Image: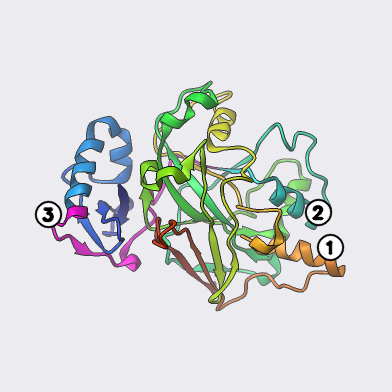
Amino acid sequence: MKLATLRDGTRDGTLVVVRRDNQALAPAAEIAPTLQAALDRWDEVAPALAALSERLDQGAIDGQPVEVSKLGPPLPRAYEWVDGSAYINHIILVRKARGAEPPATLETDPLVYQGGSGVLLAPTDDIALTNPEWGLDFEAEICAILADTPQGTRPDDAGSYVRLLMLCNDVTLRNLIPPELAKGFGFFTSKPATAFSPFAVTPDELGPAWRDGRVHLPLRSSLNGELVGSPDAGPEMHFSFFDLIAHITKTRAFTAGTILGSGTVSNADRGKGISCLAERRMLEIIDDGAPSTPFLAAGDQVRIEMLDPDGRSIFGSIEQKVVTQ
């Protein structure tokens, strides 16, 4: 099933189920008022949500037209937003771009950081350009929303804790990263608010594309109407979501409503394009000695989407415009 949050003037919005073709929705507040409330009581409410979704899909109820501009992120605020970096090609390229070597544990120990989770962006919210010198970039990723997940979860058991999947644009300020990391304490100001796809879906909606803790479909990124990347999100995800869950639960548990990101989807095959501008700039440095692609500027428009094998949008699209703040 597909779930979304309708903005209603409150912090957490109203939970709705969405028809499989993304064209209609049905309020689900009588089952659970918000997505977080549903996650807190998932075993109790999921069957009723699934039944409502089935009625909507079969036309037993008409539903209301979907207006994406009225939707917030599926979780308008989350208990935690933990982002990994599971694609080794991306790590190598962006490290080169800032003159840093990959970590010695590149292939054995996942990279993660903890982002801001109190303010999350809707799929159509603007991206604020506060200072062009900060190097504004987009990053197209896949995310999982977790159930209550205990400390010490093993990869083989991690699948039972993945409740929902969605997409995100992990907005990054590239030129703030090197001085931040030089202090030895990690990302903070270089990671502004993240935007999410309009719909979060249960893993079964992906069919055989969801396997081994990975989504085996291309993730499409467009800039100003031009497709700039369509890398396959599956085969080159070195650390699966199951591996990432095992890593983050090594020393602590996580609560229902935690968002876990894959990191920027990236393929070694240049023909698949890019999911962030930093990768393109690094390739230009390799080929030409200097980058020629600018970072995002006011007026630029970013679109991120994933299609199923029949060309249907699974999560809906993130469509954001860069605006001067």
Asked if the residue under mark 2 is in contact with the one under mark 3, i.e. CB atoms within 8 Å, the reply is no
Mark before the other along the chain sequence, 3 or 1: 3
- Horizontal side of 54 relative to 88 (left or right) equals left
Which amino acid type is marked by label 2? Lys
Mark before the other along the chain sequence, 2 or 1: 2
Q: CA distance from mark 3 to mark 2?
A: 55 Å
Q: Which residues are magenta?
A: 56-82
Mark before the other along the chain sequence, 3 or 2: 3
Q: CA distance from mark 3 to mark 1?
A: 57 Å
Residue reaching furthest to the bottom: 299
- Horizontal side of 298 relative to 44 (left or right) equals right
Indicate the secondary structure of the residue bearing disc 1: helix
Callout in the foreground (2, 1): 1
**Image coords of residue 165 (percent x, y):** 43, 46
Q: Is residue 285 above or below residue 144?
A: below
Asked whether 272 or 281 is in front, the reply is 272
Asked if the residue under mark 1 is in contact with the one under mark 2, i.e. CB atoms within 8 Å, the reply is yes
Which amino acid type is marked by label 3? Ala
Which amino acid type is marked by label 1? Ile
Q: Is residue 73 above or below residue 52?
A: below
Q: Quadrant of residue 33 in the image? A: top left
Q: Which mark is residue 96?
A: 2
**Image coords of residue 246 (percent x, y):** 56, 28
Q: Residue at x 53, y 33 (%)?
A: 242
Q: Residue at x 68, y 65 (%)?
A: 134
**Image coords of residue 122 (percent x, y):** 41, 60
Q: CA distance from mark 2 to mark 1?
A: 9 Å
Provide the residue designation for mark 1: 286
**Image coords of residue 148 (percent x, y):** 40, 29
